[in-house]
Image (tube, grey):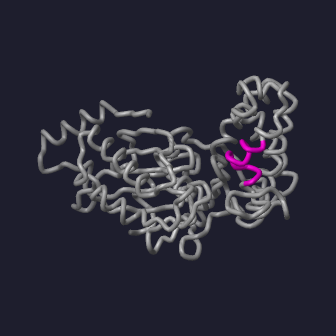
């Protein structure tokens, strides 16, 4: 588990408490004290927890492998214990927080605060996450689709600042899409938008974790790509050499091997870029964004292997009136994106 505590800020907070017992919170808004925010981002492979002050500045954060065991109640208790431990390490208590935010994979029933059945969280079916976490933490809890939360994070703190229309597209365990339209997060009917990763790109194509065939996630999602690679990677490829054996191959090995010019890895990157560009072109015609922010795999691959080829493919497919002013950019928050996503869920997530 990776844990980060800002010693400077801890000393600062302690100094504020000792110097003025009347002002325990970071700042006041119209005479009302504004507390800290607890952000939690749960994915299929990692759990990220962060504490931020009222201005969104990270005070402490930690990352660990996702504790998903198939038993949602046990998992929720583990997550709550990890969050409580980080709060204690930061010399804070529940009373110092305004809210906790939970950035989670969809689909979500926002009205009930429940996770319905995310393909990448096995066993999590109709889990009343908002109420259970609120009970365990002693805080109001807000849920937000993880891609929505990431879009908010890039819009508030990352490369999307100043944009009125932004698309965030991430390829991690699955594929998520978050939309900022006309300067507001777009959630759709009952908060169920932003599942573009399950739009069909190949009729009767690869089976997706959601049960459908041909979903974009089945071609760009990290879990699906990993399964494919472990079936088809040649034993003589640089990809296999970097992984040690085919059963251990990950997308990151493809990215590294493609950077060295490995033929198989370059073919796989070309395939990845093709489907990514198709997705961006479709979103461009539908939404006309100013900025498309790409996370995880695309960001790790960088300009030469991914971003430049994707920009060229998109430019060849969309009208100049739509594409000339649109920027396709890597995430500006990097490894800190999950922390900011959780914090944005706390401050701007679906009301509890």
Of residue 24 and residue 213, the one placed in the foreground of this image is 213
Of residue 28 and residue 175, the one placed in the foreground of this image is 175
Q: Quadrant of the N terminus?
A: top left
Q: Residue at x 83, y 51 (%)?
A: 315
* Residue 8, picture quadrant: top left
Picture coordinates of residue 45, whole percent (x, y): 56, 44
Give the residues drawn in magenta, as a range. Answer: 218-228
Horizontally, residue 122 falls left or right of residue 86, namely right
Picture coordinates of residue 313, whole percent (x, y): 84, 48
Is any atom of residue 90 visible in this view? yes
Is any atom of residue 345 visible in this view? no
Q: Is residue 290 magenta?
A: no
Q: Is residue 227 magenta?
A: yes
Horizontally, residue 233 falls left or right of residue 96, namely right
Q: Residue at x 66, y 39 (%)?
A: 299
Horizontally, residue 126 falls left or right of residue 304, namely left
Picture coordinates of residue 111, whole percent (x, y): 46, 74
Horizontally, residue 340 falls left or right of residue 15, namely right
Q: Residue at x 23, y 61 (%)?
A: 32
Q: Is residue 184 above or below residue 137?
A: below
Q: Is residue 195 above or below residue 155?
A: below
Picture coordinates of residue 309, whole percent (x, y): 82, 41
Magenta stretch, main secondary structure, is helix
* Residue 130, picture quadrant: bottom left
Q: Quadrant of the C terminus?
A: bottom left
Of residue 52 and residue 43, the one placed in the foreground of this image is 43
């Amino acid at each position: 588990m990776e844990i980060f505590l800002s010693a400077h800020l801890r000393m600062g907070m302690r100094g504020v408490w000792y110097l003025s017992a009347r002002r325990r919170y970071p700042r006041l808004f119209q005479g009302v004290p504004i507390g800290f925010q607890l952000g939690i981002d749960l994915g299929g492979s990692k759990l990220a927890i962060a504490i931020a002050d009222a201005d969104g500045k990270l005070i402490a954060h930690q990352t660990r492998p996702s504790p998903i065991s198939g038993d949602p109640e046990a998992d929720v208790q583990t997550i709550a214990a990890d969050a409580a431990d980080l709060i204690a390490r930061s010399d804070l208590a529940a009373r110092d927080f305004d809210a906790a935010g939970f950035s989670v994979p969809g689909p979500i029933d926002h009205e009930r605060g429940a996770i319905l059945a995310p393909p990448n969280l096995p066993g999590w079916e109709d889990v009343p996450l908002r109420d259970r976490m609120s009970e365990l933490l002693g805080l109001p809890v807000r849920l937000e689709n993880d891609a929505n939360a990431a879009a908010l994070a890039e819009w508030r703190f990352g490369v999307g600042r100043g944009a009125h229309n932004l698309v965030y597209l991430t390829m991690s365990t699955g594929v998520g899409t978050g939309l900022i339209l006309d300067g507001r997060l777009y959630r759709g009917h009952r908060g169920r938008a932003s599942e573009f990763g399950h739009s069909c790109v190949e009729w009767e194509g690869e089976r997706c974790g959601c049960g459908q065939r041909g979903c974009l996630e089945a071609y760009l999602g990290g879990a699906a790509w990993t399964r494919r690679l472990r079936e088809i990677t040649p034993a003589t490829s640089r990809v296999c050499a970097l992984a040690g054996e085919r059963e251990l191959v990950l997308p990151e090995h493809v990215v590294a091997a493609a950077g060295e010019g490995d033929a198989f890895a370059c073919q796989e990157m070309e395939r990845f870029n093709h489907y990514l560009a198709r997705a961006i072109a479709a979103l461009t015609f539908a939404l006309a964004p100013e900025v498309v922010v790409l996370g995880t795999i695309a960001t790790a691959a960088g300009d030469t292997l991914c971003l430049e080829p994707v920009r060229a493919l998109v430019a060849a497919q969309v009208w100049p009136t739509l594409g000339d002013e649109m920027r396709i950019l890597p995430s500006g928050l990097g490894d800190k994106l999950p922390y900011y996503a959780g914090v944005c869920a706390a401050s701007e997530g679906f009301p509890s």
